[in-house]
Image: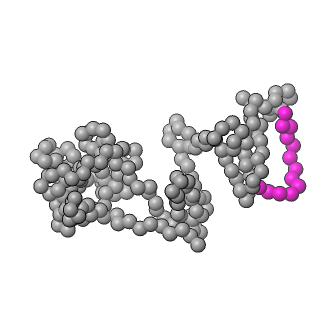
Amino acid sequence: MATGQLFYDPIPRPLSALGAPLPGGFYNFYVSGTTNAATVFQDAALTVPFPAASLNGSQPLFSVVTADGTGAMPVIFLNPVTIYRVQLFSSTGSLIEDVDPYVPPMPVTGNGQLVLDAQGEATINAPIPGGTGITLTVNSRSGGTALELIGSGAGAPAFIANTTVLAGSQTATFVATNKPGSGTTAPTKWLPLTCDGATYYIPLWT
């Protein structure tokens, strides 16, 4: 059975220190560590920013998001490349919270379940049928690297592949003591790889 996905209300309703709703209260967003305004958005595509507004009589430069008469905020989308500082004010401009940096909850969407246990171990369960059939895709930024694996020490596998090794007779031509294209160069290092409980070593040349 699939692991359940926690539901959370996408429309925040912040409360006062006494647990009362805050009709007319508002959030203000800064770049972390500064008092420079940081833009937040009304849509997931980050194409519709919240209008610049005045903060306590200042010039209208800030992303101020105001609650309605029931204390409910509109849906707010953050730019994932911005580290935010978030302030919560009452309708009268009294500061209630100042969180810096703001760490958003891990984004979860669709029907695949990402499980993070108390030890900090993350498991991505198989998605439901449909889509590409690829459980995880890692895209690198321009000039960056898509994935880095760091082992616990020399000779300790940083990658484990289970229920994927093909058994039986296969045909291959390979000389493990030679660098491809060279008849004499021995491997300079070996990369350990664990498959189905057994550790194998892949030769590496420089």
Extreme residue in the bottom direction: 1
Q: Magenta includes 169?
A: yes
Question: Where 27 falls versus 192 (above or below)?
Answer: below
* 101 left or right of 110 in image: left
Q: Is residue 23 left or right of residue 130?
A: left
Q: Is residue 175 in view?
A: yes
Which quarter of the image is occupied by the C terminus? top right
Stretch in magenta: 165-177
Residue depicted at 70% across the width and 53% down the height: 161
Counting from the top left corner in percent of width and height, residue 60 is at: 16, 46
Q: Percent from the top left, x then y, of residue 8? A: 38, 65
Position in image of residue 88 (x %, y %): 23, 53
**Residue shown at the point (20%, 65%) measured from the top left:** 20
Decide if residue 181 is in sight here. no
Based on the displayed image, in which of its 4 quarters is residue 204 positioned? top right
Q: Does 154 sit left or right of 26 as displayed?
A: right
Does residue 95 lie above or below 19 as drawn?
Answer: above
In this view, the residue farthest toward the top is 184
* Residue at x-position 22% and y-position 59%: 17
In this view of the protein, which residue sits in the foreground, 146 or 13?
13
Model colouring: one colour
Which image quarter holds the N terminus? Answer: bottom right
The residue lying toward the viewer, choosing from 116 and 26, is: 116
